[in-house]
Image (cartoon, helix red, strand yellow):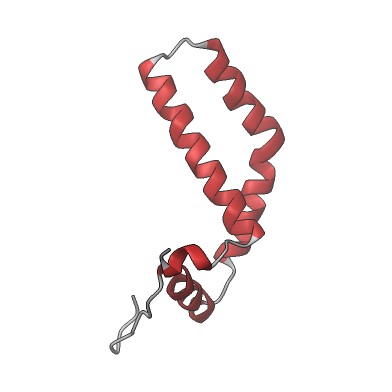
Amino acid sequence: MSQAAKAPLDADEERITRAQRLLIQLGAALVSHPFDTHTHDRLRAFLADDAGGVLASLEALQQRPETELRQRIAELSGHTLRSFGGSA
């Protein structure tokens, strides 16, 4: 098992990850079958029920300090990011 699998996502990270995967699936479905009512229903349900929470989670992640974000990336990826005098 990789080290990345050992670092669980927090609630905000999990919510955003799930939403991103769903929206990519729905986007692909809309491209391949633009008039599929089931896909439209799923998208409408997401926008009505889940989008607000996802946007709040995204805002919470965006408010994290850079050092915390770098540390979290290192935890999830299993290695350390180094800064060499500039900002990344």
Q: Which residue occupies the foreground of this view, 63 or 78? A: 78
Q: Residue furthest right?
A: 49
- Left or right, residue 83 beside residue 50: left
Q: Which residue occupies the foreground of this view, 63 or 77? A: 77
Q: Which residue occupies the foreground of this view, 32 or 63? A: 32
Residue 40, above or below 65 = above
Is the C terminus in the top left, top right, bottom left or bottom right quadrant? Answer: bottom left
Which image quarter: residue 9?
bottom right
Is the N terminus in the top left, top right, bottom left or bottom right quadrant? Answer: bottom left
Residue, x 45% and y 31% (percent of image)?
25
Residue, x 28% and y 87% (percent of image)?
84
- Left or right, residue 55 beside residue 75: right
Residue 62, above or below 18 = below
In percent of width and height, residue 67 lies at: 49, 81
In percent of width and height, residue 32 lies at: 36, 18
Q: Which residue occupies the foreground of this view, 22 or 5? A: 5
- Left or right, residue 15 beside residue 30: right
